[in-house]
Image: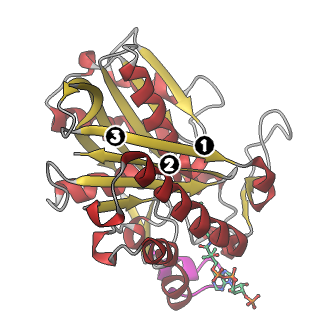
């Protein structure tokens, strides 16, 4: 028997308002054709009044708890991955904790931008294994629309808002049983200037806007993701053929295709939501995971690879048996 962090529920939440490429083309010099061809994005949800990172995170957490058949009081650890917190402090995870009505457990935010959910899963897994808590809510939630420069067509068409959550439970399982099997994380701060926000509390005293050299990020993403997926497979002894589903960070359909091709994975095994969610940063992997579990594609016993790459750069992957 091995102590593992087992996935027992998933949930997600999207802002009410969906915005099409056509609608954006009335705001900046772009077109549905350009956005679809270069990114695969057709629509995204954008937060409206009263919708914040913490409110979306709370809705996603409630859905994940319901799917797991658990109550907020059953949760001893909440980790929220976000780069768009409601406030500079306190951590939005503590707002979620309060809204859920569970008190006294551990709650904190993780900032690793688009890889944030992978970082959060890895930290939660380690904490569950050492007994810091028995059950964890791991959430990725963002309101990217609030840090977009709505005059900059090279970034504002790419992102969306939303939240996804999972519940992990520490269990003693058979070696071939469920749970997180391996995770691998990386960062390389030498590439800060390729994808960043031009503000912050300690530098400018402002929130700032997203800036990105898209073409360079694209190139690094394909190389780094293929490498880290190879590392996780190497650590666990599985091969690409053993994987039932890949749930990738949803930045660009072309990145998903290129990474799958590099690994020799058929595109049918890749869960895609970028067309309707766009890039929701830390929320994109749990949003896609929840979608594929709820529509019945991902089933109990499946071997699932999660992966992401984002600002920093940061990147990582986790392999789990559902
Ligand atoms: O989530 C974190 C990780 N982020 C990513 O992984 C994003 C990675 N990068 C990408 O997804 C792609 O690089 C983009 C979608 C951002 C851009 O696609 P691209 O094929 O690399 O285009 P490009 O930046 O090379 O731009 C091509 C042309 C440029 O015009 P010129 O210089 O060739 O005349 C841009 O000015 O497309 C132009 N362009 C646009 N045209 C219409 C840029 N944005 C737009 C736009 N609408 N929204």
In the picture as drawn, the residue positioned furthest to the top comes out as 104
Of discs 1 and 3, which sits in the foreground? 3
- Mark before the other along the chain sequence, 2 or 1: 1
Q: CA distance from mark 3 to mark 2?
A: 21 Å
Q: CA distance from mark 1 to mark 3?
A: 21 Å
Tag 1 residue: 112
User: Is residue 289 visible in this depiction of the protein?
Assistant: yes
> Is disc 2 placed on a helix, strand or loop?
helix
Please, is residue 307 above or below residue 207 in the view? below
Q: Position of residue 104 (x, y in %)?
A: 40, 8
Mark 3 Cβ and ligand 1 under 8 Å apart: no
Tag 2 residue: 282
Of discs 3 and 2, which sits in the foreground? 3
* The magenta segment: 19-32
Which label belongs to residue 181?
3
> Is disc 3 placed on a helix, strand or loop?
strand
The quarter holding residue 246 reads bottom left
Q: Position of residue 163 (x, y in %)?
A: 40, 47
């Amino acid at each position: 028997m091995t102590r593992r962090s087992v996935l027992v529920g998933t949930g997600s939440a999207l802002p009410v308002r969906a915005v099409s490429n056509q609608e954006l083309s009335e705001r900046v010099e772009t077109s549905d054709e350009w956005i679809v061809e270069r990114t695969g994005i057709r629509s995204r949800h954008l937060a409206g009044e009263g919708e914040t990172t913490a409110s979306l995170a709370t809705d996603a957490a409630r859905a994940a708890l319901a799917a797991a058949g658990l109550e907020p009081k059953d949760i001893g650890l909440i980790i929220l991955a976000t780069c768009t917190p409601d406030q500079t402090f306190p951590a939005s995870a503590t707002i979620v904790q309060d809204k859920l009505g569970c008190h006294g457990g551990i709650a904190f935010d993780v900032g690793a931008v688009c890889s944030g959910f992978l970082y959060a899963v890895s930290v939660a897994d380690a904490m569950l294994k050492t007994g810091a808590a028995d059950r964890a809510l791991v959430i990725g939630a963002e309101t990217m629309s609030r840090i977009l420069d709505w005059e900059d067509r090279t970034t504002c068409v790419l992102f969306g808002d939303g939240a996804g959550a999972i519940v992990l439970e520490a269990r003693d399982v058979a070696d071939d049983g469920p749970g997180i099997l391996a995770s691998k994380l990386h960062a390389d701060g030498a590439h800060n200037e390729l994808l960043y926000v031009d503000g912050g509390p300690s530098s400018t005293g402002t929130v700032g806007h997203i800036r990105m050299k898209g073409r360079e990020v694209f190139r690094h993403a394909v190389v780094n993701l293929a490498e880290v997926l190879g590392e996780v497979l190497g650590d666990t002894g599985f091969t690409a053929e053993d994987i039932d589903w890949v749930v990738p960070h949803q930045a660009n359909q072309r990145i998903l295709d290129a990474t799958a091709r590099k690994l020799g994975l058929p595109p049918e095994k890749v869960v895609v939501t970028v067309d309707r969610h766009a890039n929701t940063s830390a929320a994109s992997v749990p949003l896609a995971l929840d979608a594929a579990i709820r529509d019945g594609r991902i089933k109990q016993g499946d071997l699932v690879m999660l992966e992401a790459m984002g600002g920093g750069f940061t990147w990582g992957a986790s392999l789990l048996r559902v």
